[in-house]
Every structure is written in C-alpha cells, then in structure tokens.
Amino acid sequence: MSYLQPMFDGELAPGIYQLISRAKADSLFGDMTEQGWRGFYIDGDQVTDKASFLQAAATAMEFPGYFGHNWDAFEEMLVDPSWRSAPGLLLLYDDPVTLARRDP
C-alpha cells in the first residue's frame, strides 16, 4: 500500500502534511500518476529564502505567468488550482531544513 493511499482515498483533508518516508520521490510520483494526480518536486537544497522558495514552487508547479511571487499569490495557486487539471495535486518539498536555517 502506498504511503499516500489515505490521501487518495479522501481520508485526509487538503492541507500541509509531513511525510517521513524512505520512499523515493519517483516511487511516490508513480503512485500519484496511477491515481491521476499531479506531483511536483522542490529540491530544498536550492531554497535559501522566501524568493527562492516561491521561484522554485512556480517553476516546479508550472504556475501561470500572472503568479505574483508573494505568499498571497502562492496560497491562491494552491487553494484554486483551476490552472491545472487533475483530481489532486501534491507538492513534495524535500529537505526544508536549508530554508529553515538560512531564513527562519
């Protein structure tokens, strides 16, 4: 069974969750694809501040050109994902420690 199965089954409300797993991102993305979901990946080693996080998210998730590169705009992209058609979206942010250390 996938680590993500409770999410696919609707047992988890949309939100932010910490997934502690030895599963590789490719394996998790394979599970998402089987369910019709879209998966996006941010390599946290490259994220050092707010601006680099927002840019990494915009690039990974292929935000539309009107994305405003601020927290409000980021929240709008997540809450209203009409710009991306899929039954579900999942952003895997690997190694958030770099950002936490450099820009608490």
Image (tube, rainbow, N blue to C red):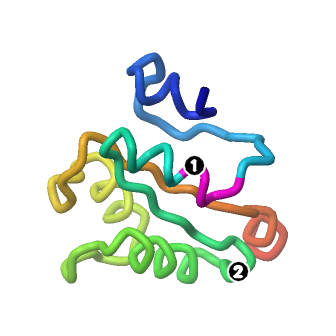
First to last magenta residue range: 24-28
Residue depicted at 59% across the width and 32% down the height: 2
**Could you tell which of marks 2 and 1 lies nearer the N-terminus?**
1
Which element is circle 1 on?
helix
53 lies above or below 28: below
Residue at the extreme right: 101
Left or right? Give the position of 40 relative to 69: right
Residue depicted at 38% across the width and 77% down the height: 69
Residue depicted at 15% across the width and 53% down the height: 82
Label 1 Cα crowd, 10 Å radius (few <14 / some 14-19 / many 20+): some
| Helix, strand or loop for the magenta stretch, by majority | helix
Left or right? Give the position of 89 relative to 82: right
Image coordinates for residue 12, horizontal then vertical, percent: 47, 22
Q: How many marks?
A: 2
Task: Kindly identify the amino acid type of the residue bearing the numbered disc 1.
Answer: Leu
Quadrant in the rendering for residue 1: top right
Image coordinates for residue 9, horizontal then vertical, percent: 41, 21
Closer to the observer: label 2 or label 1? 1
Is residue 84 found inside the magenta-colored segment of the image? no
Q: CA distance from mark 2 to mark 1?
A: 25 Å
Placement of the C terminus among the 4 image quadrants: bottom right
Which element is circle 2 on?
loop
Image coordinates for residue 5, horizontal then vertical, percent: 52, 27
> Are discs 2 and 1 less than 8 Å apart at CB?
no
Q: Nearer the viewer, residue 43 or 77?
A: 43
Q: In the rendered image, which residue does mark 2 sit on?
A: 48
Residue depicted at 29% across the width and 72% down the height: 63
Q: In the rendered image, which residue does mark 1 sit on?
A: 28
The numbered disc on residue 50 is none
